[in-house]
């Protein structure tokens, strides 16, 4: 199926402004509360084309930049129990389809590669608009995105059994992304 729907942006390569963007996650701990974290080093680019069919999004996240506010936990996440950053230093995402949901919302389906495994991940995206940055005169576009992934799909199965079918760390990881892209 071909669509003529376009993004409300000028065609070209829109690089992310990482200083004004965030990549965050949450996961359940002991089934009681959510632990939050973020990645401090990442890059992304939005290729705006004549239609959504030919537009694309790509991102690279440096896994060693994980930051949960706890140095011991961050070191454990970098280990072979989770990210194995010595072997797999990056997580990548490449869109395979972008569809218009109406009212400034989009669905982005893409291939996420983590821990040497590639699997589809869907992002629900909201277009927040565009504006000039008065500090440097650049023109910006803002997006908010959410999604969920399963740790086990990516071979990250470390856990501590808690009895009665409970585990210390939830399988589902919620993603939350705020991104500003700069006009080419």
Image (spheres, rainbow, N blue to C red):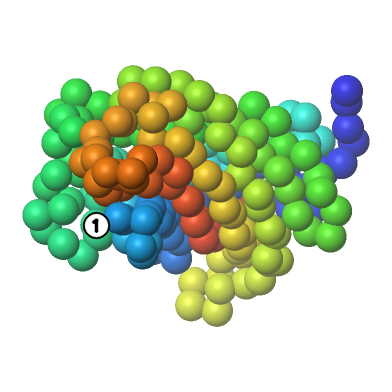
Q: Residue at horizontal 90%, vertical 36%?
A: 4
**For the view shown, which residue lies furthest in the front direction?**
164
Q: Can residue 52 be seen in this view?
A: yes
Which residue in the rendered view is the most extreme toward the bottom? 134
* Count of number-bearing discs: 1
- Coordinates of residue 147 in the picture (x, y in percent): 56, 47
Q: Name the residue under label 1.
A: 67
Q: Residue at x 36, y 40 (%)?
A: 165
Residue 183, position as x, y percentages in the image: 61, 54
Q: Residue at x 62, y 72 (%)?
A: 132
Task: Please determine whether, in this image, residue 92 is positioned above or below residue 7.
Answer: above
* Pick the front one: 156 or 83: 156
Q: Nearest the camera: 158 or 25?
A: 158
Quadrant of the image containing the N terminus: top right
Left or right: residue 89 compared with residue 8: left
Residue at 12% in and 47% down: 75
Q: Where residue 45 appears, x then y in whole percent?
A: 53, 42
Judged left or right of residue 118, residue 47 is right
- Compared to residue 71, the image places residue 12 above or below, namely above
Pick whichever, 55 or 78, lies toward us. Answer: 78
- Mark 1 falls on what kind of element? strand
Residue 97 sits in which quadrant? top right
Q: Is residue 43 something that shows in the picture?
A: no
**Residue 130 falls in image quadrant:** bottom right
152 or 76, which lies in front?
152
Structural crowding at the residue carrying mark 1, measured as other residues with C-alpha within 10 Å and reported as few (<14), some (14–19) or many (≥20): some
State the image coordinates of residue 71 (x, y, percent, origin top left).
Answer: 11, 58
Left or right of residue 71, residue 90 in this image = right
């Amino acid at each position: 199926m071909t669509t003529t729907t376009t993004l409300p942006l000028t065609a070209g390569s829109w690089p992310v402004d990482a200083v004004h963007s965030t990549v965050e996650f949450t996961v359940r701990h002991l089934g009681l509360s959510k632990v939050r974290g973020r990645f401090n080093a990442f890059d992304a680019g939005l290729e705006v084309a004549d239609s959504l069919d030919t537009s694309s999004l790509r991102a690279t996240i440096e896994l060693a930049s994980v930051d949960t506010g706890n140095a011991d936990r961050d070191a454990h996440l970098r280990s072979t129990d989770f990210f194995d950053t010595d072997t797999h230093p990056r997580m990548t995402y490449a869109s395979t389809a972008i569809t218009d949901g109406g009212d400034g919302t989009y669905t982005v389906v893409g291939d996420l590669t983590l821990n040497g495994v590639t699997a589809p991940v869907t992002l629900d995206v909201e277009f927040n608009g565009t504006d000039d940055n008065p500090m440097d005169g650049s023109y910006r576009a803002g997006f908010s995105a959410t999604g969920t992934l399963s740790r086990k799909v990516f071979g990250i199965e470390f856990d501590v059994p808690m009895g009665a079918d409970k585990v210390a760390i939830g399988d589902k990881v919620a993603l939350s992304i705020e991104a500003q892209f700069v006009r080419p």
